[in-house]
């Protein structure tokens, strides 16, 4: 769970930096697609249900939305 938490922390930071304009959209979109695939790996939903409340509201909303969408192949 520790490594999964660190991965989520990384993507939360990327998400928030993008919101502030510090990260280029092209750079972010590629990373966000990768995270979308990570979200659909076995066990992620369980981890997210336990820890999601500890992240920024805007990030949790974005993750919750993507959790309900299938990632592109």
Image (cartoon, rainbow, N blue to C red):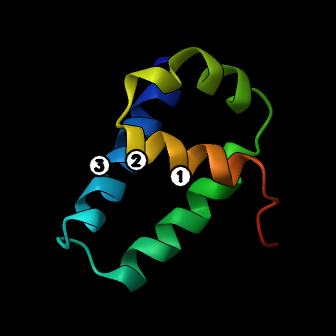
Give the numbered dot on residue 31: none
Quadrant into which the C terminus falls = bottom right
Q: Is residue 55 visible?
A: yes
Front-most of residues 59 and 72: 59
The tag earlier along the polypeptide, 1 or 3, is 3
Is residue 25 left or right of 20 when viewed as pictured?
Answer: right
Is residue 18 left or right of 11 when viewed as pictured?
Answer: left
Residue 10 drawn at (x, y percent):
36, 45
Residue that appears at 51% across and 75% down: 30
Q: CA distance from mark 1 to mark 3?
A: 13 Å
Disc 1 marks which residue?
62
Residue that appears at 40% across and 31% down: 6
The secondary structure type at the circle numbered 2 is helix
Disc 2 marks which residue?
58
The tag earlier along the polypeptide, 3 or 2, is 3
Mark 1 crowd level (few <14, some 14–19, many ≥20, 10 Å Cα):
few
Residue 31 drawn at (x, y percent):
48, 66
Mark 3 crowd level (few <14, some 14–19, many ≥20, 10 Å Cα):
few
Residue that appears at 75% across and 26% down: 43
Disc 3 marks which residue?
13
> Dividing the picture into quarters, in which one does residue 45 lie?
top right
Residue 13 drawn at (x, y percent):
29, 48
């Amino acid at each position: 769970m520790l490594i999964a938490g660190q991965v989520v922390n990384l993507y939360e930071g990327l998400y928030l930096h993008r919101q502030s304009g510090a990260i280029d959209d092209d750079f972010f979109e590629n990373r966000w697609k990768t995270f979308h695939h990570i979200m659909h790996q076995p066990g992620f939903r369980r981890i997210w249900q336990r820890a999601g409340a500890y992240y920024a509201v805007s990030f949790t909303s974005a993750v919750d939305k993507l959790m309900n969408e299938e990632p592109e192949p």
